[in-house]
Image: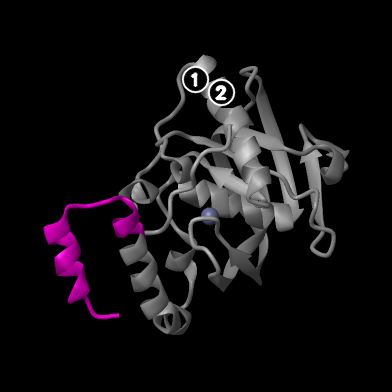
Amino acid sequence: MILSILQYGDPILRAKGKQIAKIDDHIRDLAANMIETMHAANGIGLAAQQVGETLQLTVLDVSQIEDRPSTLKLNGKDVDPATSMPLLLINPEIELSGETEIGTEGCLSFPEITGEIERAELTMARAQTLEGDKIEIEASGLLARAIQHEVDHLNGILFIDRMNSAAKAALSSRLKRLQKQTKRGKRIRPQDEQALVGETL
Ligand code: ZN
């Protein structure tokens, strides 16, 4: 089932995800729906908060992106990232290493907005699978960037928080407009809608 993706302005995007203590049918259904939703939106990653669930669960798939390569080691073994997707991480913890690099990012919760974001080159993520097994994922390239972006979501951090102040200032009116649209989409009470009309763009 394709889920609707929350947009910037929805407070759930700012909530830290709870640890998943038990992998039950709800988690299995949510995971399957998140993968379907990510693919339908042509995204390379999706976090539970983006579909309204404050849980430590994210899915990733960089297999369709050929011009921005990735490397992947699963439990210490080199594997082909293209054939190992989608990846699903439950309760991930990450360590960052290597240099930092700047790259372009977009976010499914920020339609048509991109930014240049500084991230670590390498990530080591420890997480659980849907079967409850522990996995270690070492990544570089686009996948390392995507993992950092998604783990940020799980902690209520958004990519605009990592833009430099000039970039954020340049986007300010678009961000305000998006927040406003998000609020309107939630069919808020008319008197609140009236109050929004006076908001500076
Ligand atoms: Zn995002």
Vertical comparison of 135 with 180: above or below: above
Which labelled disc corresponds to residue 193?
A: none
Q: Residue furthest left?
A: 191
Q: Position of residue 74 (x, y in %)?
A: 78, 35
In the rendered image, the vertical position of residue 63 relative to residue 115, given as above or below: above
Mark 1 falls on what kind of element? Answer: helix
- Quadrant for the C terminus in the image: bottom left
The foreground one among 201 and 170 is 201
Q: 100 left or right of 177? A: right
Is residue 45 placed above or below 77 in the rendered structure? Answer: below
- Residue sitting nearer the eye, 184 or 46: 184
**Image quadrant in which you'd find residue 127:** top right
Residue assigned mark 1: 26
Look at label 2 and name its amino acid. Answer: Asp
Q: Is residue 21 highlighted in magenta?
A: no
Answer whether residue 23 is visible to the viewer in this image: no
Q: Position of residue 146 (x, y in %)?
A: 64, 53
- Residue pictured at 84% horizontal, 45% vertical: 82
Quadrant of the image occupied by residue 121: bottom right
Q: Residues within 10 Å of mark 1 (few under 14, many from 20)?
A: few
Query: What residue appears at the point 47 percent right and 49 percent down from the top-left corner?
Result: 153
Q: Which residue is mark 2?
A: 29
Amino acid bearing label 1: His
**Is the C-beta of the residue carrying label 2 under 8 Å from the nearest atom of ligand 1?**
no
Could you tell me if residue 115 is visible in this image?
yes
Is disc 1 in contact with disc 2, using a CB cutoff of under 8 Å? Answer: yes
What is the total number of numbered labels drawn onto the structure image?
2
Instruction: Identify the secondary structure beneath mark 2.
Output: helix
Q: Give the residues drawn in magenta, as a range.
A: 182-201
From the viewer's perspective, is 65 left or right of 35?
right
